[in-house]
Amino acid sequence: MGRHMKVTPEEVLDTLLGSAQKGAPRTKRDLAQTYDVCNTTIASKIRTLREDGNAIIHDRDGYRLISKELLQEWDGLASTLESFINWSLKIVRSMYVSLDPTGPILPEMKRQLGDGMTQDERRLLGKQCVKVKALLDHMEAESEFG
């Protein structure tokens, strides 16, 4: 077996765009086989594309590229939007699950980690703890009403 090909984020984006115009998602494995690269490489390219502002979601069927132009053309708009909403909710739930156990230990963590730090480091850590606590409070309030 030879060396793996190199693939650029733009090539992956073009492939997703072509698939999106047909209304079909592409799996990570399928994209990896298309470019003869590993799944991790595809995940890295997708992450780069998302950081560049491309709306790429994934569900059990694979990756989907979302754009205003494509949304107007798709027959399966409702199912695509449902996938997007489910994907978004999954991210929020995952954040809450990973952050929830942190809530009770935030004050102690801040005290323990702050002992050997400079004032600037403690200030930075304090700001981060406040952000996590605010996010947890917001998510907890939402779960009470949702």
Image: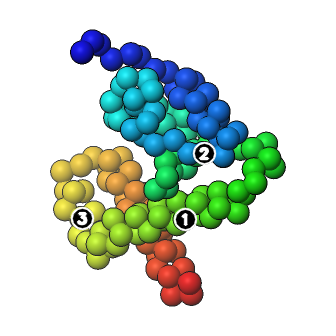
- The vertical placement of 2 against 101, above or below, is above
Please, what is the three-letter code of the amino acid marked with disc 1?
Answer: Asn
Work out whether mark 2 precedes mark 1 in sequence or the reverse, and give the earlier one: 2
Task: Tell me how far mark 1 sits from mark 3, CA to CA.
Answer: 33 Å
Identify the residue at horizontal 40%, vertical 31% (top origin): 32
Horizontally, is 144 left or right of 76 in the view?
left
Label 2: element kind:
loop
From the image, state whether disc 1 or disc 3 is nearer to you. Answer: 1
Disc 3 packing (10 Å; few <14; some 14–19; many ≥20): some
Residue toward you, 115 or 138 = 138
> Can you give x and y, in whole percent of width and height, for residue 79 in the image?
65, 61
Disc 2 packing (10 Å; few <14; some 14–19; many ≥20): some
Q: Which mark is residue 109?
A: 3
- Taking the view exactly as shown, the residue that stands out farthest to the bottom is 144
Q: Which mark is residue 96?
A: none
Q: Is residue 79 visible?
A: yes
Residue toward you, 113 or 23 = 23
Q: Which mark is residue 86?
A: 1
